[in-house]
Amino acid sequence: MHRSSVTFFLAASLLVSANSSADARVDYLLHCAGCHLPDGSGVPPDMPSLRGDPGKIVSLPQGRDYLLRVPGASQALLDNADLAQVVNYMMTEFNRDSLPADFKPFTEKEVAEARGRVLADPAKLRAELWEQYEARETTLLQ
Ligand code: HEC
């Protein structure tokens, strides 16, 4: 998209954003889509897709925390309430199929607590979480 059409699109979205999910979409486009693309598909392997895996990761004890602590999320120039909305938008828009039925939306308080602990090595924790996820799935299938 040409830059001026992006600006027009964002301005139009801001004008019509009467509810928080529209605001969350605009914030996602401004703060995350540059790397993860507007539809969350990313540019793997450098910029991971946000479609599918976060819905699986969120069900692990340390997983919720991880999703808030990755540098792209924790260091975004958004306040805690807005970041919670953006991450919730990511979960419900891009992870509909993998989201656990008992998923509870991220709260401002939870974001405030987690984002201060920015992950120095996201790939390492992700590998550990993924191992836990696969081990649990294998146990459930037996
Ligand atoms: C400058 C590029 C960039 C921006 C902007 C960015 N991210 Fe990321 N994101 C990454 C990279 C790279 C990773 C892989 C982990 C790492 O190296 O930080 C990642 C990983 C993630 C993950 C973990 C995905 C997984 O499956 O492990 C989540 C969730 C995430 N980002 C959410 C966001 C959100 C929400 C925003 C906007 C508030 C955002 N990111 C902005 C580059 C970015």
Image (spheres, rainbow, N blue to C red):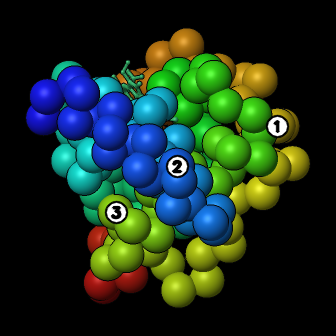
| Amino acid at dot 3 | Phe
Q: Position of residue 132 (x, y in %)?
A: 44, 53
Q: Residues within 10 Å of mark 3 (few under 14, many from 20)?
A: many
Q: Quadrant of the N terminus?
A: top left
Is the residue indicated by label 3 positioned so its CB lies within 8 Å of ligand 1?
A: no
Picture residue at 48% right of the left edge, 17% below the top: 121
* For residue 128, above or below residue 51: above
Q: Quadrant of the C terminus?
A: bottom left
Picture residue at 63% right of the left edge, 23% below the top: 77
Mark sitting on residue 94: 3
As rendered, which of 22 and 18 lies closer to the eye? 18
* For residue 4, above or below residue 26: above
Q: Residues within 10 Å of mark 2 (few under 14, many from 20)?
A: some
Picture residue at 53% right of the left edge, 53% below the top: 15
Q: Earlier in the sequence, mark 2 or mark 1?
A: 2
Q: Earlier in the sequence, mark 3 or mark 1?
A: 3
**Residue under label 2:** 14
